[in-house]
Amino acid sequence: MADHHLATRPTADDPGPTTPGGPGAEPPAWRTPKRTRRSTRTVRVTVSAVIVAAVVLAVLLVPPLVQLDEQAVDLSMKLQPPSLAHPFGTDDVGRDLLLRCVYGLRVSLLVGLVAALVATVIGTAVGAAAAAFGGWTDRLVMRLVDTFSSVPHLLLGIFIVAMFRPGVWPVIVSVALTHWLSTARIVRSEVLSLRARPYVDAAISGGASRWRVTRRHLLPAVLPQAGLAAVLMVPHAMWHESALSFLGLGLPTHQASLGNLVQSARSSLLAGDWWPTLFPGLFLIIPTLAIAGLAGAWRERINPRRRSELML
């Protein structure tokens, strides 16, 4: 028995078996150290903030500072590749593609911001009213939300835009009326959870009306979630506008928008000219990813308990 104990006793050279989580255990290979995750998130947020700031400065400063007509046609400069004079090259009628992309991004960003704001206001009002009043009001509103949600957004947007002439405001109305549904669901769930709080019960017991409780206590508490929904909706609205313009149902074809630029570059791409398609696509993808990165950081800050441990 003594020999058995000596044989199984850990030594300095052989520390013996370790249990998961013990002093000698190694962290699992799939788990990223917390410090690495934090530094990665910091880099991601910094890069996203720099890109968004550059986009805002470009759309605000380039049009008034650059005294050039983005609609000016010069057939002698048709489909010139990227160069020092034209960093993004020229399109099929000789217009500077960099200037066209900035103007297109300006229009797409305007449509996305206004549509996201209008959709957030509608969704917040509908969701708060449904949860605050409850009963048949809640059931009626949620059945309405389910009905609209069953129709694809793009199909419903095409139906709305088809009733008007191509322009900025029909696209904004189309995007706003098809994107308030998710905000209404989020606000409704938040208000339902807030209704069970003691201070809400105390306000109702004190004689406050449902409208007063909703306006003074419930709506201010859900504003951070509604703001986050609005920020997340901006990239989606930009893509929706670009899809409608690409199909010829959004903005007029002569007006610079990212969807129109990609649509007009299809024939050039088939001919082997890649830059009229690449740069408008990058102007659409990179800003939307940057806005989504900032929105993700905001979501982690206002609701840190829902962070994913595997998120880099």
Image (cartoon, rainbow, N blue to C red):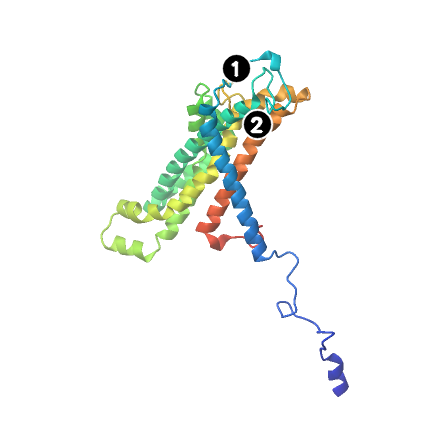
Label 2, secondary structure: give it. Answer: helix
Percent from the top left, x then y, of residue 21? 61, 67
Instruction: Tell me which label, 2 or 1, sits earlier in the chain.
Output: 1
CA neighbours of label 1 inside 10 A, class few (<14), some (14 to 19), many (20+): few
Residue 125 x, y percent position in the rendering: 35, 39
Residue 280 - label: 2
Q: Which of the image's four quarters has the N terminus?
A: bottom right
Label 1 element class = loop
Q: Residue at x 45, y 35 (%)?
A: 179
For the point 74% across and 83% down, the residue is: 6
- Horizontal relation, residue 194 to residue 252: left or right: left
22 on left or right of 177: right
Q: Amino acid at mark 2?
A: Pro
Cα–Cα gap, marks 2 and 1: 18 Å
Q: In the image, is residue 94 above or below residue 107?
A: above
Can the viewer see residue 151? no
Q: Which mark is residue 276?
A: none
Q: In this figure, which residue is indicated by the disc labeled 1?
A: 72
Residue 22: quadrant of the picture: bottom right
Measuring from the top left, give residue 190's x and y in whole percent: 40, 48
